[in-house]
Amino acid sequence: MQLSHLDENNRPKMVNVAEKEISSRLARASGVIKVSQEAFHAVKAKAVKKGAVLETAVIAAIMGAKKTSELIPMCHPLNISGVEVDIEEDEKMCAFKLFVSVKCEGKTGVEMEALSGVSIGLLTIYDMLKAIDKSMEISNIVLEHKKGGKSGEFKRV
Amino acid sequence: MQLSHLDENNRPKMVNVAEKEISSRLARASGVIKVSQEAFHAVKAKAVKKGAVLETAVIAAIMGAKKTSELIPMCHPLNISGVEVDIEEDEKMCAFKLFVSVKCEGKTGVEMEALSGVSIGLLTIYDMLKAIDKSMEISNIVLEHKKGGKSGEFKRV
Amino acid sequence: MQLSHLDENNRPKMVNVAEKEISSRLARASGVIKVSQEAFHAVKAKAVKKGAVLETAVIAAIMGAKKTSELIPMCHPLNISGVEVDIEEDEKMCAFKLFVSVKCEGKTGVEMEALSGVSIGLLTIYDMLKAIDKSMEISNIVLEHKKGGKSGEFKRV
Amino acid sequence: MQLSHLDENNRPKMVNVAEKEISSRLARASGVIKVSQEAFHAVKAKAVKKGAVLETAVIAAIMGAKKTSELIPMCHPLNISGVEVDIEEDEKMCAFKLFVSVKCEGKTGVEMEALSGVSIGLLTIYDMLKAIDKSMEISNIVLEHKKGGKSGEFKRV
Amino acid sequence: MQLSHLDENNRPKMVNVAEKEISSRLARASGVIKVSQEAFHAVKAKAVKKGAVLETAVIAAIMGAKKTSELIPMCHPLNISGVEVDIEEDEKMCAFKLFVSVKCEGKTGVEMEALSGVSIGLLTIYDMLKAIDKSMEISNIVLEHKKGGKSGEFKRV
Amino acid sequence: MQLSHLDENNRPKMVNVAEKEISSRLARASGVIKVSQEAFHAVKAKAVKKGAVLETAVIAAIMGAKKTSELIPMCHPLNISGVEVDIEEDEKMCAFKLFVSVKCEGKTGVEMEALSGVSIGLLTIYDMLKAIDKSMEISNIVLEHKKGGKSGEFKRV
């Protein structure tokens, strides 16, 4: 089995997708940041007013998804057609779960865009809370759902 | 308690660090990607020859650390003075653990640079293996160690 | 009335344009910088020879238009197909009026590209003259004309 | 009089600031966007809940200030030490006035950073409201205040 | 004869390609770096193990090709569909010859993407060897082959 | 002999310069583009009026020098304090020789900034002339002069 991102000399390459069909692509990824009780409540206290921490994370996630091909060496530049971000709060666990959905009409999938958006959104929450808590943990960054393209649909079970 | 990244109207701001002392800063972060057995062995097979997957991740992590202030809205631009990346392979778990250490002489810490480097390095591994395995999971992204600055040393226990 | 850039929870989102038709898009924007007499003549003196101030502004405007989706959080990345810049000099007012026209075949308009190009071109003129005059004013940044897309033609009156 | 951004052949150059003293720099700039009554109230309606339009503009202004040296050809890259953004609402005029303050310890001023932040913040408001109103006008982008450096203090009168 | 990148006032413009046909584009460029014997063998010594110098250059070339429209003022942003990099070693001459092939379906050619990839790949080799040899020379950067578009095929003789 | 950009496992790293002294750095690099007679005269014809081709190359070289640490994986981000560009025309050879001088106060040299500026300036000339001549050749990219830092002065002989 040959990794598609390596050529016959095992040098990295950006796979040629020119021959692929254009199809409607969707990818949805998610990830979690666990924070201290104190940090969780600091966010919530703001959220009542303006939610500036989570709002900033949403914007960072969208802008981060757009930057994917600059960050991940073998990713194709592509014109994503839409990005949506959701954040679920888990008060019991003192955790925030961030979801990013990316859509595109194109020859290559948008999994990396969704995953990068999630990562950068979570890092932004870390950044805004790190004065309170340095032991936060980012985890469970996974692809939830993917549609479109030759490899077909993927749903995380 | 007021989050330092929010002003008195709870608007996000980039904290003013002008008055802070310049000190030697170090931050070390890590994170893990768990992959399928098939994907793990695809990397290892290459590693014997050239390790192109992990090599690409190392470079992406370094370049990603440099991009931190473009990605995380409230991060200060800063001239990091060094970045090192290590990757540990856990054959039993089919996992790669990626470490990034960042150094800087400056007025603000480099935790976010280390954490961003880790995240982007792990996403790069995901990207290069996703043709084999779409259910990989990125987790345990944490700050391991931090030195320098007014808040002093932090060591993850 | 719901703002299209906000989702049902009022979180910012990048609007999905996947279902939209591709059409020929054009946008033309303009803006003005008013400068001191001394600064105006400094530009003109150069213009006789090489016009380096205005030339630099033209290039900055074109490069700035290309950067729009990195600057404006909810803007879609898109492959603009052409950019033209004009500068009118108003000797009586000691003002420069900068026009940017952007073309694209796509699913979303290029108003923001034209407006960003104008803003960055004018800021470049400010930068190059600020040693002479710090009280310059940038104003009248408006969309002059827009064609293509479902919302049809717009002409400023 | 020779423009400092042009060399003796009138070619653009990035002025050498190596010999300059490091000093504490501050610049504060402002600008205005005038919108339709309908657009103004759309923002206000959201503001009661979350203020997502203005919140997004604040973040775009901060990130835009950090991008100044990529946008303005002759600007020096520099490590700004803080950015704050304020927005005043003028209900009678249906206008938003955006202020950006930038601080830096360095050899060159931060006027362009403040002015770029203002411009990009205002463009972001335009972007988020353009579905309602395409005739909005951005104006009065000026330097309000500047401190530090050889040229001393400047206060707009 | 009028240069296509200048308008009728000799101002630079980004040529409008909206009316052009979409076609399959290919460009292949190459360039050479001549290094000292000591530097050449330092790379080779590593190459036996991991080839980290050349591997880094390959990745830099691919990422550099993606950045072309940010670097070259009048270049159109475009979604390249594939990039491949080869490096030939000339032991007798102590030289490395780097090839970059870029593919795209679009309205404009990818010569500049291939040439930029070559240049940045060679600069990366320079960077990694400059502690050993500062007199290295980069030369022979040329377009080898180009296909697609109205101007047809070009093969360097 | 160990390459400084590789760690003890031959993984690329960004060398730590934290312990180095700050010194005044200068680097001057140059490179040549040879073009057809027709292309050479097209530039000159414009030059009489406005020199837009060479002017654009000058600006691209300056902006390219600022982007070096984004392009060359192991380069440190740094705040260059000045950039100057010169272009010599060689009518007999139909060639342009481009020089870039970069200054910085810092812990690491600016050779790569000067060389990147030269490369991007020459690529810009290629871009603007490629409609006339596709067989142009970029060559002789070398470091001319370097001052400052522990390794001392270097002058190309």
Image (tube, coloured by chain):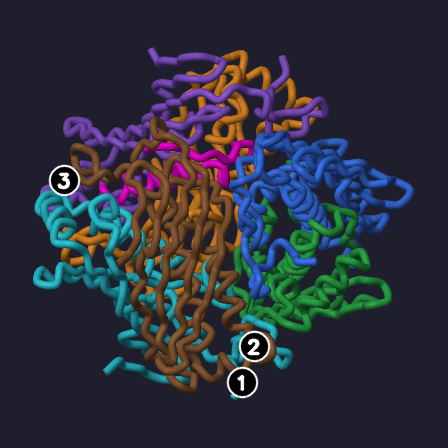
Chain colours: A green, B blue, C cyan, D brown, E orange, F purple
Q: Is residue F76 magenta?
A: yes
Badge 2: how crowded within 10 Å, few (<14), some, or many (20+)?
some
Q: Which residue is mark 3?
A: F44
Say if labels 1 and 2 share a chain: yes
Residue at 54% across, 52% down = B14
Relative horizontal placement of residue C10, taking residue C127 as reference (left or right): right
C120, C14: nearer the viewer = C120
Q: Is the residue C136 above or below the residue C18 in the image?
A: above
1 or 3: mark nearer the eye? 1
In the structure shown, which secondary structural element does the residue marked by tag 2 occupy?
loop
Residue at 83% across, 48% down = B38
Q: Of the residues shown, which amino acid type is indicated by label 1?
A: Gln
Disc 3: host chain: F
Residue positioned most to the right: B92
Q: Which residue is mark 2?
A: C6
Do tag 1 and tag 3 residues touch (Cβ < 8 Å)? no
Q: Is residue F81 magenta?
A: yes
Relative horizontal placement of residue B81, taking residue F110 as reference (left or right): right
Relative horizontal placement of residue E65, taking residue F91 as reference (left or right): right
Badge 3: how crowded within 10 Å, few (<14), some, or many (20+)?
some
x and y percentages locating residue F34 in the rendered image: 26, 32
x and y percentages locating residue F29 in the rendered image: 35, 25
Part of the protein shown in magenta: F55-83
Q: Of the residues shown, which amino acid type is indicated by label 3?
A: Lys
F71, D48: nearer the viewer = D48
In the structure shown, which secondary structural element does the residue marked by tag 3 occupy?
helix
> Which quadrant holds residue C120?
bottom left
Q: Is residue B128 visible?
A: no
Q: Which residue is mark 1?
A: C2
Do tag 1 and tag 2 residues touch (Cβ < 8 Å)? yes
Residue at 26% across, 69% down = C140
x and y percentages locating residue C154 in the rendered image: 31, 82
